[in-house]
């Protein structure tokens, strides 16, 4: 017999009664505000075609590395979860059996943000009333699949049901953006925009980098064998992305390193990189120079920069060779920002027209480096707690370590940064609850008035993201 599934109305709010009451009041005032999701990795094709999602397994397990990395850590293979390999598709697996395997191991997620998000979706979106486990597995699978086949659970209907004002996806410069074009040309009013993610043609260590540059040149009509032509190709492609709604770029570099080379030095470095005759330090220097070049382009075209450094991507070499990128093996690493960003900031840091949103997977940098930097440079904002720290504790630590130095208004609000579309309302709800709890504590300590806290709660929920991403 499965336990009841009950989402407590005061979940994540402070335990102290007076503070909890105030947090509850703040939360009630913002909980139904529209969702602004300015950075994420959902698939634009979902909203272009508006086809029904196929089944519970394909929706919740196969695409979600938060889910399958936990299962993998306990010895469940990716093949058992129906995830294909580089050599070819994994042996056909029964989606019901995959779901049952997930259900029987759902206890692995106790205490994790994934559990909060999933339970929220199960209860609030699908109306489940018992907890997921081996006993309820088939009930969940059949109920979810039945609802997914209805018009009310098509992507556009869910987008509207979730009260999403805007959703940003992330695409490579090599993407034709045909799905975004289809959305723009349709009569649907949902706002889905793209984001320019140039890593495949900026990172010399990226798979197929040399072939990507050739394709980049063919797409833009520029000579990407020359430094000047290569930069022009970026300008051309950024403008194309802007016509499809983009307001931002995104950069997933290993470090926050930047450079400020002159044109002759940059040309020589570029030629070493495209010839494949470069060292690891050359690759790092090239990535750093390109961040500075992207900042220059942002001053021209107004695209906001997002920098997501500090992830050792695809750490599990064997898994990477068999299954490719993004299979749950990305690991946080120590990241330095003060010296790393100085070349870029020396050149552009005082430009009020430039907006760079900084993220980190190294929480030790919050109070030591990031909050002081954002609390000084007009070009810098702090992005929310990201990835491994997109959790109740991570969000609290972010506010505690950054607010005293950077304040609230040098931050960019919340973004969910997810591939899991149905988890978006759950993620935003967690952020709203944590922020209201933090604000309530400041009020009970007489550091804010209730009026100020209510105004800040609205800004953290909506207005800061609108401003930061120029929406």
Image (tube, grey):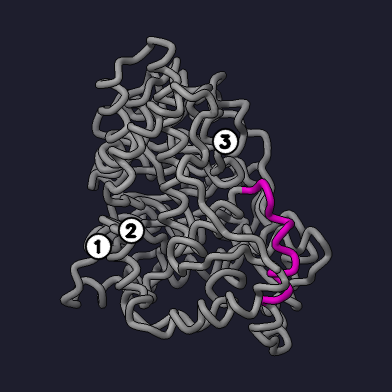
Position of residue 175 measured from the top left corner of the image (x, y, whole percent): 40, 70
The span shown in magenta is 99-112
Residue at figure coordinates x 36%, y 40% from the top left: 295
Q: Secondary structure at mark 1?
A: loop
Residue at figure coordinates x 38%, y 61% from the top left: 169
In the rendering, which numbered label is found on residue 282?
A: none
Question: Counting residues from the N terminus, which is met first, the one under dot 1 or under dot 3?
Answer: 1
Q: Residues within 10 Å of mark 1 (few under 14, many from 20)?
A: some
Residue 436 appears in the figure: yes
Mark 3 lies on residue: 394
Circles 2 and 1: CB atoms closer than 8 Å: yes
Residue at figure coordinates x 80%, y 65% from the top left: 318
Position of residue 290 measured from the top left corner of the image (x, y, whole percent): 45, 45
Mark 2 lies on residue: 167
Image quadrant containing the N terminus: bottom right
Could you say which is closer to the camera, residue 2 or residue 188? 2
In the rendering, which numbered label is found on residue 191?
A: 1
């Amino acid at each position: 017999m499965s336990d009841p599934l009950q989402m407590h109305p005061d979940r994540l709010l402070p335990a102290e009664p007076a503070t909890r009451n105030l947090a509850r009041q703040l939360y009630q005032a913002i909980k139904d505000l529209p969702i602004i999701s300015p950075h994420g990795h959902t698939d634009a094709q979902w909203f272009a075609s508006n086809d029904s999602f196929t089944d519970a397994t394909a929706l919740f397990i196969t695409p979600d590395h938060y889910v399958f990395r936990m299962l993998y850590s306990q010895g469940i293979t990716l093949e058992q979860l129906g995830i294909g390999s580089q050599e070819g598709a994994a042996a056909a697996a029964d989606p019901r059996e995959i779901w049952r395997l997930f259900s029987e191991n759902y206890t692995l997620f106790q205490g994790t943000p994934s559990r909060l998000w999933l339970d929220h979706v199960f209860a609030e979106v699908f109306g489940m009333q018992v907890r997921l486990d081996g006993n309820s597995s088939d009930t969940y699978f059949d109920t979810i699949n039945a609802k997914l086949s209805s018009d009310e659970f098509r992507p556009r209907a869910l987008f509207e049901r979730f009260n999403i004002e805007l959703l940003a996806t992330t695409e490579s410069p090599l993407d034709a953006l045909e799905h975004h074009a289809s959305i723009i040309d349709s009569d649907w009013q949902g706002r889905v925009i793209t984001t320019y993610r140039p890593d495949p043609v900026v990172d010399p260590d990226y798979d197929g980098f040399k072939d990507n540059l050739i394709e980049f040149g063919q797409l833009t009509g520029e000579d990407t064998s020359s430094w000047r032509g290569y930069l022009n190709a970026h300008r051309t492609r950024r403008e194309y992305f802007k016509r499809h709604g983009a307001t931002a770029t995104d950069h997933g570099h290993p470090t926050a390193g930047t450079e400020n080379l002159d044109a002759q030095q940059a040309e020589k470095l570029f030629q070493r990189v495209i010839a494949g005759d470069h060292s690891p330090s050359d690759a790092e220097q090239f990535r750093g120079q390109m961040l500075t070049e992207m900042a220059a382009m942002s001053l021209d075209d107004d695209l906001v920069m997002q920098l997501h450094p500090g992830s050792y991507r695809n750490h599990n070499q064997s898994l990477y060779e068999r299954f490719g990128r993004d299979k749950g093996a990305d690991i946080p690493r120590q990241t330095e920002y003060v010296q790393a960003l100085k070349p870029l900031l020396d050149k552009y840091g005082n430009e009020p027209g430039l907006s760079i949103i900084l993220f980190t997977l190294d929480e030790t940098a919050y109070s030591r480096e990031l909050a002081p930097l954002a609390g000084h440079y007009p070009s810098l904002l702090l992005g929310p707690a990201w990835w491994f720290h997109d959790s109740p504790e991570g969000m609290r630590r972010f506010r505690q370590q950054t607010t005293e130095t950077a304040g609230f208004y040098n931050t960019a609000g919340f973004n969910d940064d997810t591939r899991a579309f149905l988890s978006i309302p759950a993620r935003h709800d967690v952020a709203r609850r944590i922020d209201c709890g933090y604000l309530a504590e400041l009020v009970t300590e007489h550091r804010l008035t209730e009026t100020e806290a209510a105004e800040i709660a609205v800004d953290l929920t909506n207005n800061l993201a609108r401003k930061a991403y120029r929406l």
